[in-house]
Amino acid sequence: MNITSIKNHTIMPGTALQALSAARQNNNYNTNNQGMEFANIPMMGNVFNIPMSPSFGSRLETYNVHKPIIKEGLNELGKEEMVLIIHGGSFPATSETDTGYGSPNSTGARKLIDFMSGVFTGIQLGPGGKTKSSDSSPYTGTLFSSNPLFVDLEQLTTGKWAYILPDEVFEEVVAKNSKRDKAETNYSYIYKAQEDALRVAYDNFIEGTGDKINTLKREFEEYKNADINDPWLENDAIYEALSKKHNMDYWPLWDDELDKNLMAMKDTKEGKERIREIQTEYAAEIDFYKFVQFLYSKQIADTKEYANSKGIKLIADKQVAFSDRDVWAYQNLFLKGWNLGCPPDYFSEDGQDWGFPVVDPEKLFNPDGSLGEAGEILKKSITKIFKEHDVLRIDHYLGLVDPWVYPEGKTPKAQDGSGRLYSSPHVDELKKYSIIGRENVDAERIVDNIFNHREWSENDYVANNLTEEQYNKYALYIDKILLAAVRDAIIDPDSLAALQDAAADTTNPKRAAKAQFKLDEIEKKVKNSIIAEDLGAVTTPAKLVMEKMGLNGIKVTQFMNAAYEDDPYLPTAFKDEKQKGYWYMAGSHDNEPLSSWAKKIVKGAKEGDEAAQSQIDYISNYLYKNSPKYEEYKEQMARDPKFLMQSVYAMMLKSDAKNIQVFFTDLFGDERVYNTPGTKPEFNWKVRPENDFSSQYGRALDDNMAFNFVTSIKTAIKSRHEDERA
């Protein structure tokens, strides 16, 4: 048996079975410096003996030195994935490289990856599309084009890029950043400054000579001509050229009707002639746009390789919406007169009128079931994502299976004619697209509730009696577009077809069984490569598709309602075998920090709020009901938000959830709100960790504000042990 000594602390790897056996026989307790008792159980990595006293050092040192023990503790708790959520613009920098916007390709990002390695298994990024000059929200970015702000300028000053960006240009960008070292983005500044710097790099690239430049130029030509970049790269570059011409990157305000409708007329004589004119007149502008996309493509490939070498997966985030650029390029593929939104829910009493276009269902698939033009484009966008990332999170999964749509100029309320695109046989304008019929809907109840202003729920729409044919129609997008693209990324179609043929070979059972085993493993990898964001109200068809397809959704602790035993966000929900692969988190980018939530719960309980008290009662019972200090812990939780917050982390770890996500503000104990849905973009998407994020984490650990892995693991394992003994 290998024995590793870290600062006089002996670590003896064991097995889960040995640990549990020892736990049942062990009645000794020790107390950490927070006054919380923990069983002295010889677990894997001896996690209960990790010292936390000042004599050992700071808690940050404990985290860094004891990563192997923390990892073993997570394994003991059955945690397969531990993922940090941090959007691209929020990555830290260094003081010398802080341009005002983060990048997953930066030196700061690599330092964060190093910090995470050994404990975390993945980084979930935000959507990576190009955003507008007037809106920093990543959820309005482009379908294909990557955000130029994620090109790391520092790299362009090095020999790897033939020094195409002069040091003094880069240094000036950093020096003029008024938010330097202030742990927030400076979007309006960097949007223009980044483009100016990239234009200098492009000019030097075009004019440069030498072996390195020539190699890069050959790679650039290959990139422009690659099938995966056709036709989106040319379309988006032409849009950029026209935006410069019209001094406006919002095409509905252009004053040239032909330019506004160019891609809708691309197959006409007039359209073809206009496209050739633009390609000639704006050749340099078009090439520059493609060059920036080339830079990002190479940099993200290097980032993925580096992250993977550290045991970290890159997880993309795909929004359900479309950017202005996409709408212009594919406007013939959208349903006229309808927008995508959200019905009244947790975040908005009136619903959310996103204003995004809705893909025409008749353009997704052809009558024979093959992909239509819109289906092909959407599949290509997913293929591109998997070329650059390992896993994909689908934002608003419901919008793919059963989207909520509302008439242009109206509200997203049902009273204004809004409804589910594929589940509204009672709405005259939508019934042609409805997969279900009136026999699936309590139509009288809906009409009565809507027009008499009674309490209404969108779940009034759909009954639980879908036929297999109806289910298959709801599942088409997921099966034929999303999962098909993932399968193509994992195994080429010819090899997949060969395996399928072999699995169907009744003349050779052994060969068929071997092929089927490989197919099952591929399908498992496909399903685990998707995270379906299913927060909020999810309709019966969407739930059924998730279950039958075996997709993993998300559960947020802040959404749990302890008053209901069957609440889907309680930690006990993961006891269901189908739910164990779901992702558990304290909060996403749309939630307030857990610290703020905990303060509200404690304040509410003190003021006699029953809902707040029920949360405290539930968490106390879940974690400490069999502890000899149950009453003490419960009382502490009711008065100490920090204790409540750390208990929530322990609750997540104790649960049977295999996968855990942590938003970066919660990890670093940052109390700033990242995004408040429905508010103006200038108030959102700004927060970043400090450039010296490890010191920030250390301070927050010492103040019990950060996610303390050691304490949470100890609490979770001890709670399981006490439950076993009870």
Image (cartoon, grey):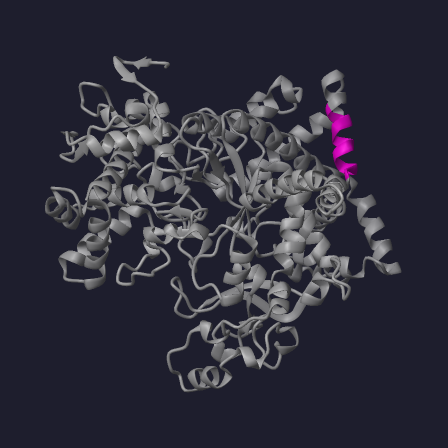
Q: Which of the 4 image quadrants contains residue 713? A: top left
**Foreground of the two, 407 or 152:** 407
Confirm whether the magenta stretch covers residue 225: yes
Residue at 70% in and 42% down:
509
Q: Main secondary structure of the magenta part?
A: helix
Report the quarter where the C terminus lies.
top left
Image quadrant containing the N terminus? top left
Using the rendered view, name the quadrant where residue 53 is placed.
Answer: top left
| Residue 586 percent coordinates (x, y) | 35, 47
Front position in the image: 191 or 91: 91
Q: Position of residue 389 (x, y in %)?
A: 58, 38
The percent coordinates of residue 378 (x first, y second) are 67, 53
The magenta-colored residue range is 216-226
Q: Nearer the viewer, residue 374 or 178?
A: 374
> What percent of the width, then of the height, locates residue 655?
33, 45
300 sits to left or right of 722: right
| Residue 20 sits in quarter | top left
**Residue 351 falls within the magenta-colored stretch:** no
Who's the residue at 29% across and 37% down the image? 706
Q: Can the viewer see residue 135?
A: no
Q: Which residue is pictured at 67% across the width and 66% down the height?
A: 361
Up the image or down, 340 lies above or below 305; here it is below
Give the answer, above or below, for where 371 lies relative to 287. below
Say whether residue 349 is visible. Answer: yes
Drawn side of residue 651 relative to residue 112, left or right:
left
Residue drawn at x 40%, y 83% is 453
